[in-house]
Amino acid sequence: MLGNGRDVIVDVQDVKMVYNAKNRDESTHVHALRGLTVQVYENEFFAIMGPSGSGKSTLFNMIGALQTPTGGGVLIEGVNLATLNAQQLAAVRCFELGYIFQTYNLLPVMSALMNVSLPTVFAGMTTAEGEKRAMECLKIVGLDDRAHHIPSELSGGQQQRVAIARAFVNKPRIILADEPTGNLDSNTGQEIINYMKSLQQEMGTTIITVTHDDKMLTAADRMAWIRDGQLERVANREDIEIQMGSISEH
């Protein structure tokens, strides 16, 4: 038991990612991650920040079982993702992980309800059960009255709320959010952060987000800064609040 009595749910161990690694000409190698190690605890809101090209998106893909590292390992609940076959990885993505993307990734011809309930089909739920679960999630994000509207009939903020509901619908242990407020104005972005925090508390989920948005400081339990493929530092809630207080004073 670590982190104030909480278990480690994601354990990134000395992860390296080298693109063009099979090319003998080392000058063509691109080192996206350079032996990065970090742990994420159960039920925490963990934010990852860093400049463009720092490796944070590559780390996101590793944790999300979307890429395999060229060195080191990513363990989810003690299981090394690199040891799983394609079918097992698909099960992890379906039942253990939920994804929120900057561009929403909603199917344009499907209603909000249908978009949210879609992952339940792959989880083996009946249509009735999936739609019931989807409506529960839409209600939490304040969109149950828009359930039968297609994405083009919704604002950007509403579409992101639908995407958040979809990510939570299978009640995954971990939510991965890639720049969830990146396409939104400041006020709407704060609303999205609040909805994510509410759902996290409602369902006891771990949230890992990659972001450039300083407003994420208000929600994160811990925040990691990545630079040049390496972990620069990790700050806990208390350190973040001290930093925010220092910024406001100046």
Image: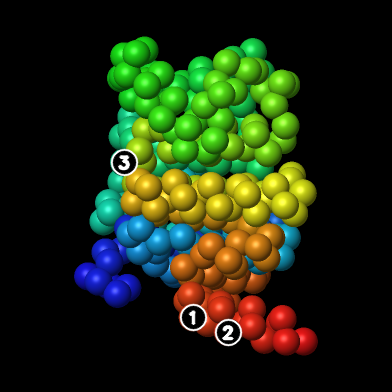
Between label 3 and label 1, give the one nearer the viewer: 1
Q: In the rendered structure, which amino acid carries the disc numbered 1?
A: Glu
Which residue is tagged 1? 238
Task: Indicate the secondary structure of the residue bearing disc 2.
Answer: helix
**Mark 1: few/some/many CA within 10 Å (<14, 14-19, 20+):** few
Give yes or no for contact between labels 3 and 1 (Cβ–Cβ under 8 Å).
Answer: no
Question: In the picture provided, is 130 more to the left or to the right than 233?
Answer: left
Residue at coordinates 33% horizontally, 59% vertically from top-left?
Answer: 42
Residue at coordinates 65% horizontally, 54% vertically from top-left?
Answer: 190
Question: In the picture provided, is 9 more to the left or to the right than 66?
Answer: left
Residue at coordinates 43% horizontally, 26% vertically from top-left?
Answer: 134
Give yes or no for contact between labels 2 and 1 (Cβ–Cβ under 8 Å).
Answer: yes
Real-space Cα distance between discs 3 and 1?
A: 37 Å
- Residue 174 rendering spot, x and y as whole percentages: 39, 48
Q: In the rendered structure, which amino acid carries the disc numbered 2?
A: Ile
**Mark 2: few/some/many CA within 10 Å (<14, 14-19, 20+):** few
Quadrant placement of the C terminus: bottom right
Task: Indicate the secondary structure of the residue bearing disc 1.
Answer: helix
Which residue is tagged 2? 242
- Residue 200 rendering spot, x and y as whole percentages: 42, 51
For residue 84, the mark is: 3
In the displayed orientation, state which residue is furthest to the left.
1
Residue 212 can be seen in this image: yes
